Amino acid sequence: MTAAARARKYEPRRVPETKVATSAMIASLAAEGYDTVAAPFGHALVEAAKDDARIVGLTADLAKYTDLHVFAQAYPDRFYQMGMAEQLLMSAAAGMAHEGFIPFATTYSVFASRRAYDFICMAIAEENLPVKIVCGLPGLTTGYGPSHQATEDLAIFRGLPNLTILDPCDATDVAQMVPAMIAHDGPVYARLLRGKVPSVITRYRPDYQFELGRAQMIREGRDVLVVSSGIMTMRALDAAELLAKDGIDVAVLHCPTIKPLDTETILAEAGKGRLLVTAENHSEVGGLGEAVARSLLRAGVTPAFRQIALPDEFLEAGALPTLHDLYGLSTAKVAQQIRGWL
């Protein structure tokens, strides 16, 4: 084969250049009309640290992007910048926990679940240490592609003994989960909503109070029961408003604790003859949907069951609103799927 022929055969595939504005890739997750709270995690941690000297903060070069910079500014002598070394971050947090501290370790969900898993398993979970791992960009909350999209973090962590797993919906959930994490004597992994976080739940339940391990009914409905976590509770509530215009009454049961799952509440609500839909910002494999299905099957409760989740594949990069529409997580797509199943 001549050099010219080889060059033709192995010529790189040409991909059209597309540029997406950063603002579109990290667009707000909330619909218009919701109030927002700036850095609820960081401010809640500062408030808790006022009366608890055991609380320290560590990050792997991501303080600003996990809202831990708020804590760092308030308590610089209790803040540790570990550099871009997530394994070291988790090991240091474990060591501090052994010495009586309550470390909050922050990074992105992909780095904690994929890169530092063995250190979390061996140094933290096996020892049942009170390390609180709080991670930004869970699921499809960024348009930057598979390197930053933690679409399988729940599946990775659900099988880890001793580890409590949280997936908050909004600013209220995030702020209230912090003292609950501190009170829990063991390791916690929490998916973090960062920056300007919408306030959603209190619009429907002004008396809402986060409780670790408890699912709560946010909206009542007679036709459909949506069991949801994280940002998908927000989407389920918005979709319920759209479906109400068609005479479809949707209940939304919010499950901010993925493990341990509030099986008792889910089973009680699942036995009322409604279509049951799980909705999660995570792969269809190994997350909330499969956890709920397992609970139903083991208990012999068999409602009509459907799942809204991300596909079992590496996702595209691009504008976040476009991706949510593409993969079925947008309000319009959630409403469309439920309408079709009915």
Image (tube, helix red, strand yellow):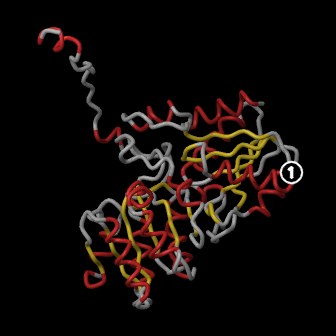
**Residue 203: x %, y % from top left:** 61, 56
Judged left or right of residue 259, residue 281 is left
Q: What residue sits 87% from the left and 49% below the top?
A: 272
Q: Amino acid at mark 1?
A: Val
**Residue 149: x %, y % from top left:** 42, 46
Q: Residues within 10 Å of mark 1 (few under 14, many from 20)?
A: some
**Residue 30: x %, y % from top left:** 49, 46
For residue 49, above or below residue 28:
below
Judged left or right of residue 37, residue 272 is right
Q: Which residue is more in the foreground, 106 or 217?
A: 106
The extreme front residue here reads 1
For residue 269, above or below residue 128:
above
Give the quarter of the figure containing the N terminus.
top left
Q: Secondary structure at mark 1?
A: loop
Residue labelled with disc 1: 301
Give the quarter of the figure containing the C terminus.
top right
For residue 196, above or below residue 249:
below
Residue 83 sits in quarter: bottom left
**Residue 215: x %, y % from top left:** 70, 62
Judged left or right of residue 233, residue 71 is left
